[in-house]
Image (tube, rainbow, N blue to C red):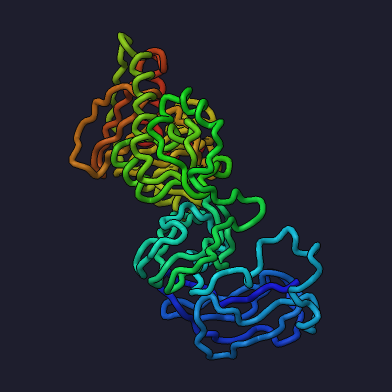
Amino acid sequence: MRHEIIMPALGMAQDKGTLLAWRKSEGESVTEGEALFEVETDKTTMEVEAPASGFLVEISASDGDEVAVGKVIALISDSRDASGSSPKEPAAATSDQAPEADSLPPGKSVIMPVLGMSQDTGTLVAWSKKIGDQVKEDDTLFEVETDKNVVEVPAGVSGYLVARLAAEGDDVPTGETIAIINSEQVSAMVDRAYSKSAVPTPEPEQAPSETVPKAAADPLAAKRPVAQAARRSAPEGKILASPKLKRMAHQAGYNLALLAATNHPQPFHARDFEVLREANEVKVDHSSAAHAGAAINRLSAHVAAPELYSFVAWAVDNVENASEQRVIATFAGASLAENSIVRIDRRGESEAFSTHHQLSHTVESESEPDLIVHDLRGTFISAAELTPESVPVLAIVGSNDELTVTLTCVDAQLAGKDAAVLLDNFAARLADPIRHLF
């Protein structure tokens, strides 16, 4: 078996890289993960690692050469004799693999980009173009998610999308070709998943007829657009959504987890906003009904802030993955109950954490919150009396010198005494963070 070594993309607009130096020679054995060569762009230099173990053969680029992104510059073979590991092995050896490159239409390859120095795969969140569509160089072709963010990737060349070689939700190694754009339409276009385990792209009209009665039982189903491409379940614990929809959800104060709970097919797009709104309104209606006639508990506390900011600065420098939001979530969770889920809403962004008394053990979560914290510091808001939500709500307003914390809840969530204990504990931690460590 042979593995292709390509010139990787180190930036979104990069179309070529300079091969600085080979770390291995022709015919030399290599180990998976071992540095093969160094490549340089106009912004950075990095080492490229071997994707598999074997022997380095058929090197086609030399030190100092400028090479187009995606071009094959060497192979890793099972033997030093490149011809001895021809890809034309017996059919049984490749029966489980995707179709070979000779079945693909001609055109320029679009690869899974490298969006971080430590990234080796990316999750294809969504295709922005259908197979056969005409695309322009600056058009968004697809959206890709890494462990840190979601990025819209442009086509990079104008023409027609004649091949899509990964389905939405597929994890694809960086540098792998996932699309082909040709200057002209072709008769034999290809639309498939990256691996046999991925769900292939279905045509909308091929949707099973048995889905109709299920939709009738779902109050939100009638407002859902037809699922296109490979819209499928996200990996457990993850919500796949386009950056545009995430921005729209944050601005409207909607929770994407409520949309996921309806089993609406992922990844979510801007066209799903109406369904997202319906899902959140259903949740609000239910919680409002539950709170109808209930006594609202609203308590406030004033807190000196300097110690909090000093503690946050110390934590960021000394505790792995520490951040201001993580500190506040940890304090709030410890004040409510052990291992609570706390969602921090700040400047239109939401971040939920599964909290632990130890700051280093507080981690991000996609679960429904037990407590919501509206962090309004740094705004012109000087007081906050929020309406009850499905869970207790803390609002923080103020400046660098003094903060005001307001808790809003109903008796069904926290009785008056318990509400006072929660607010007092949280305010005490903000005023004297060191006490939280003991």
Nearest the viewer among 63 and 365 is 63
The image position of residue 132, as x and y in percent, is 45, 61
Residue 428, compared with residue 19, is above or below; it is: above
Is residue 126 left or right of 388 when viewed as pictured? right
How many marks are shown on the rendered structure?
0
- Identify which residue is drawn at 39% across, 24% down: 283
- Identify which residue is drawn at 48% across, 31% down: 261
Quadrant of the image occupied by residue 411 = top left
- Identify which residue is drawn at 45% across, 55% down: 127
Quadrant of the image occupied by residue 380 = top left
The image position of residue 260, as x and y in percent, is 47, 35
Nearest the viewer among 381 and 335 is 381
The image position of residue 237, as x and y in percent, is 55, 40
Residue 406, compared with residue 354, is above or below; it is: above
Nearest the viewer among 49 and 182 is 182
Residue 75, compared with residue 128, is above or below; it is: below
Residue 232 in sight here: yes
- Identify which residue is drawn at 48% across, 28% down: 215
Quadrant of the image occupied by residue 303 = top left
